[in-house]
Image (cartoon, rainbow, N blue to C red):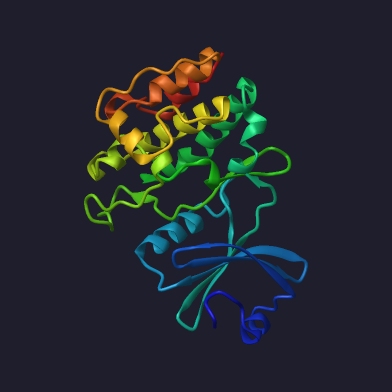
């Protein structure tokens, strides 16, 4: 199979009636496919590694959980791993972020829902560690779905990337990720990400700059308090946006209480 297209043999085997390209990155290509009356996100992965195995482990373990895509089928086709995943209708949060600007109530509701989606995953000692608007899909009814656990970390096992070589998205990375301190990564890493997301949604800007150099410079010192018109979002951001993970909220209950009026 050509990695960037689907062959007639592949289409016939999986009874695909139509498809279109969605996106691709690294070793993974994503298609939106129709199989009978159902629509799936088809992921075709070349040379699948431990990171993908871990992503699939999370999806399979929480296959009935609210707010996480469900896996329909996993197969091998030639040297490629094939994953048929529930297709989530809606928009990436990054594409509709402007609809949240200055909307305190809407942002609080969203952050609470994401926290509740991830709570059982955190409890099982998994960390997403790449939370950002591009990895959150908003369904037509407004419900969020958390996507792409590709760099999630199982805190019960050894990490699969070398110190200082962690995969991350720089704009939404945490101080411990910037500094390669993998031993400090925990659910509190995700708390920090949620603070960045909340700030971005409210202000349409990021609190610490828009490039790696700016952000890294700020992370070298105690992070300054943010100032917002919304006292609740300001309180939440200032609680979770701490350099030292130990200074961030210690559990989900505290995080949710920060978001109460």
Q: In front here: 135 or 256?
A: 135
Q: How many marks?
A: 0
> Which image quarter: residue 255?
top left
Residue drawn at the location 40% of the way across and 73% of the way down: 47
Q: x%, y% of residue 165?
A: 27, 53
Which quadrant of the figure has residue 94? top right
Q: Position of residue 118 (x, y in %)?
A: 48, 40
**Residue found 57% across the figure and 34% down from its top:** 113
| Foreground of the two, 63 or 85 | 85
| Residue at the (29%, 50%) spot, across then down | 156
Give residue 249's position: percent from left, percent from top.
37, 25
**Compared to 217, does 67 lie above or below?**
below
Along the horizontal axis of the image, is 90 left or right of 148? right
Quarter of the rendering occupied by the C terminus: top right
Q: Which residue is most to the bottom?
A: 9
Q: Please indicate whether residue 80 sits to the left or right of residue 141 in the image.
A: left
Residue 252: x and y, percent? 44, 29
Q: Nearer the viewer, residue 128 or 241?
A: 241
Q: Looking at the image, is 181 positioned above or below residue 188?
A: below
Q: Is residue 157 left or right of residue 231?
A: left
> Would residue 90 appear left or right of 134 to someone viewing this image?
right
**Residue at image point 24% right, 44% down:** 180
Q: Is residue 165 above or below residue 6?
A: above
Locate the N terminus by quadrant: bottom right
């Amino acid at each position: 199979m050509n990695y960037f297209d689907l062959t007639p043999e592949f289409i016939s085997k999986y009874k695909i009636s139509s498809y279109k390209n969605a996106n691709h990155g690294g070793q993974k290509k994503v298609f939106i496919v129709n199989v009978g009356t159902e629509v799936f996100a088809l992921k075709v992965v070349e040379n699948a590694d431990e990171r993908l195995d871990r992503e699939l482990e999370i999806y399979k373990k929480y296959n009935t959980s609210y707010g996480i895509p469900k896996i329909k089928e996993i197969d091998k086709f030639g040297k490629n791993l094939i994953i048929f995943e529930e297709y989530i209708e809606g928009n990436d949060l990054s594409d509709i972020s402007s609809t949240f600007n200055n909307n305190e109530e809407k942002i609080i509701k969203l952050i609470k829902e994401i926290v509740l989606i991830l709570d059982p995953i955190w409890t099982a000692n998994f960390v997403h560690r790449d939370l950002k608007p591009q990895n959150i899909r908003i369904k037509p009814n407004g419900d969020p779905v958390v996507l792409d656990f590709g760099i999630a970390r199982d805190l019960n096992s050894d990490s699969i990337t070398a110190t200082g070589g962690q995969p991350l998205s720089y704009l939404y990375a945490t101080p411990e990720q910037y500094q390669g301190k993998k031993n400090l990564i925990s659910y509190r890493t995700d708390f920090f990400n949620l603070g960045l997301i909340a700030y971005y949604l409210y202000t349409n800007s990021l609190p610490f700059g828009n490039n790696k150099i700016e952000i890294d410079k700020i992370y070298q010192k105690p992070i300054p308090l943010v100032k917002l018109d919304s006292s609740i979002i300001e309180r939440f951001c200032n609680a979770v946006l701490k350099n030292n993970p130990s200074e961030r909220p210690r559990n989900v209950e505290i995080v949710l209480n920060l978001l109460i009026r």
